[in-house]
Image (spheres, grey):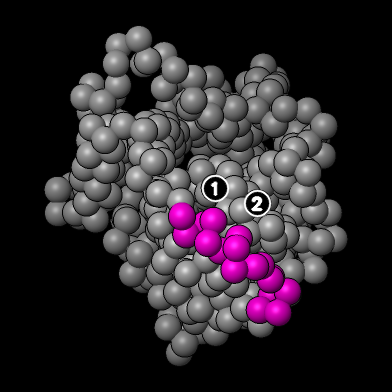
Amino acid sequence: MEQSAHEVANWQYYFAIAVFLITYGFIISEKLNRAVIALFGAAIMIIFGVVDLHTAFTSHIQWETITLLIGMMILVHITSQSGVFEFVAIKAAKAAGGKPIRILLLLSLLTAVGSAFLDNVTTVLLIVPVTLSITRILKVNPVPYLISEVLFSNIGGTATLIGDPPNIMIGSANKHLDFNAFLLNLAPIVIIISIVTLGIIYFMYRNKLKTTPEQIEKLMALNEKDYIKDQSLLLKSISILGLTILGFVLHSIIHVDAAVIAMTGATLLMLIGVKEHDIEDVFAHVEWVTIFFFAGLFVLVGGLIDIGLISSLAKEVIGVTNGDIGFAAILILWVSGIASATIDNIPFVATMIPLIQDLATGLGLSVDSPQIKVLWWALSLGACLGGNGTLIGASANVVVAGIAKREGHAFSYMDFLKIGLPLTIVALLLSHAYIYLRYLM
């Protein structure tokens, strides 16, 4: 049950804000494990009575988000064991005729599509090792490929409910925003941004990526079928993954939550595609750090809700915008984009969700009203696309930078910034125009 600011002790109000900001600071600094910090902050909130333990588990933690994440992590990990992603990447490189610039564009598009239906971190973990192998054969600099794949992982992940953690959080908090709603409202602008970004990248690198006919011949001689490790698992995993995505599409007809669909697909694939002695390995590959980070974060934000801070901020936004939904949408887009370029977008979105819900209440509207939906799309676009602004803007960026450094192809914060920031501004400008033309005119 929510409390308002006057129902909590004065010290608790400021104590909760201090705990949240200190925890947030440690998360941004990346000095300590973010899951441990989030859980510790949540525990402090509960110990000092800011958040009730029962309320934390029944109201604040978004179990739909956590269940959906676990289900998709299991599905993607098992599917990856078949070798299908390596197969597709090699096939794409050969379809490009071994030409470096064409391969760059095709692998970027493949990353975008993969990120829309898997998740962006998993997609880059699958595509980057293959990219490094291809660039090694062609003897070209892999850094442009890696940076482009990072950018397209965040762009592609914006298009669907399951593509990026912020979208999973927004969808779980709003049952009316199902898979189809995300696809119909966000995929059009994602396609436009992808085309524009591909064009810019092409002109940036078309004369910089050169190889020899001999190296192209080596690449074309690769047999992509050699990368398929388990034909039986391939058929089973692709079938179950396809049925799971179909379930998301049919959500409004079958009336089953996305989290239940994902977990059903995951457990079914484990039953028919994984040997008994390998089940523990499957669970070991779930990103538990991310899962516990989410749990702690939800409780921390719940503390801000319970002291009444979120509703107070919502009233301030109403005051600043004079209740103008259009102004609020554009404000949310740009604030989200700037914030997500400089800090992790997950804690930011976790804070913004209840704020938008309270904003709707303050304007006398329901959270599923057409007027309020534009605020959710603005938040999604800003938070997901803003992650391309800097090297620390999204998890996929950090993951790829780490792999590149380990493989001897390190790129710096400034290397990424020179490409990522201008393209992010272009993406946000296109999103601004899209929101205005589609929802506000």
Q: Which residues are magenta?
A: 205-221
Residue 213 inside the magenta-drawn segment: yes
Residue 137 drawn at (x, y percent): 61, 53
Q: Quadrant of residue 52?
A: top right
* Other residues around mark 1 within 10 Å, as few (<14) / some (14–19) / many (≥20): some
**Residue at position x 35%, y 9% in the image:** 277
The answer to whether 431 is drawn above or below residue 86 in the figure is below
Residue lying furthest front: 214
Q: Is residue 389 left or right of residue 81?
A: right
Residue 4 in sight: no
Circle 2 residue: 136
Residue 217 drawn at (x, y percent): 53, 61
Nearest to N terminus: mark 2 or mark 1: 1
Circle 1 residue: 130
Q: Quadrant of the C terminus?
A: bottom left
* Other residues around mark 2 within 10 Å, as few (<14) / some (14–19) / many (≥20): some
For this rendering, which residue is in front, 22 or 94? 94
Residue 231 drawn at (x, y percent): 26, 35
Mark 2 vs mark 1: in front: 2
Residue lying furthest top: 277
